[in-house]
Amino acid sequence: MSSLISENDLKHESDLVWLEDVSGLDYVRQSLDRLPTRAGKPAYHRDGRMIGYAVLATTAKASRASGTFRRRVFWLLPHDRDTEPNGLYASSAPAEAVDPGTLQPTVKGRKTERSEGGPPSNAMRELGISLPL
């Protein structure tokens, strides 16, 4: 889940590679995967599709125990909002989802009103609170 990713986990990222144009996506799911390389397109073993991935700098060290690198992978499932706009996530988002516009190398990203599925609640409006867009 995104909430389990810390900025420290991302300190060796040098680039994010997008396999699709993310400007039209309200959210992408992100996870930290153990991968055999610092760079290159990783194998994908989930339902749905890979949207992008992180590339690590040459200074990133492999795990002593497994010889793998922890890299972010961005993905969507078949029932996500981009393919089912009136489905399960019409007015919410999965726990690991973040607005792709908030992502950069070494930056975790965050949820926004857009990624969460819509306008702020009445309570948020009354309190003058808005999420970053």
Image (tube, rainbow, N blue to C red):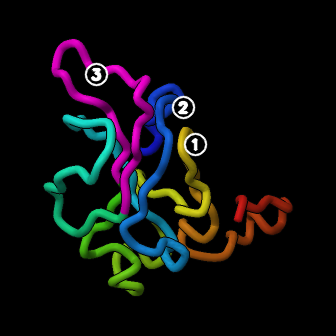
Callouts 1 and 2 close, C-beta under 8 Å: yes
Amino acid marked by disc 3: Ala
Q: Secondary structure at mark 2?
A: helix
Badge nearest the viewer, 3 or 1: 3
Which quadrant of the rendered structure holds the N terminus? top left
Q: Is residue 47 left or right of residue 62?
A: left
Give the residue pinned by disc 3. 62
Q: Nearer the viewer, residue 44 or 39?
A: 39
In the rendered image of this protein, does residue 68 appear above or below residue 45?
Answer: above
What is the x, y in percent for residue 81? 40, 77
Residue 86 to residue 88: above or below: below
Residue at (80% x, 68% y) in the render = 125
Outermost residue to the top: 64
Residue name at image x 46 percent, y 75 percent:
21
Q: Viewed as shown, does residue 19 lie left or right of 46? A: right
- Could you say which disc has been placed on residue 7 in the image? 2
Which one is nearer the viewer's eye here, 66 or 132? 66
- Residue 68 in which image quadrant: top left
- Find numbered disc 3 in the image and state the secondary structure of the residue it sits on: loop
Give the magenta range.
52-73
Circle 1 residue:
107
Give how far across and how far down residue 29 sits, in percent. Answer: 39, 57
Is residue 121 rendered to the left or right of residue 111?
Answer: right
Task: Find numbered disc 1 in the image and state the secondary structure of the residue it sits on.
Answer: loop
Q: Say which mark, if any, is on residue 59.
A: none
For this view, does 50 lie left or right of residue 66?
right
Q: Is residue 76 above or below residue 73?
A: below
Looking at the image, tell me whether mark 2 or mark 3 is earlier in sequence order: 2
Spatial separation of the CA atoms under disc 2 and disc 3: 18 Å
Identify the amino acid type marked 1.
Val
> Real-space Cα distance between discs 1 and 2?
7 Å
Query: Which tag, 1 or 2, sits closer to the chain's start?
Result: 2
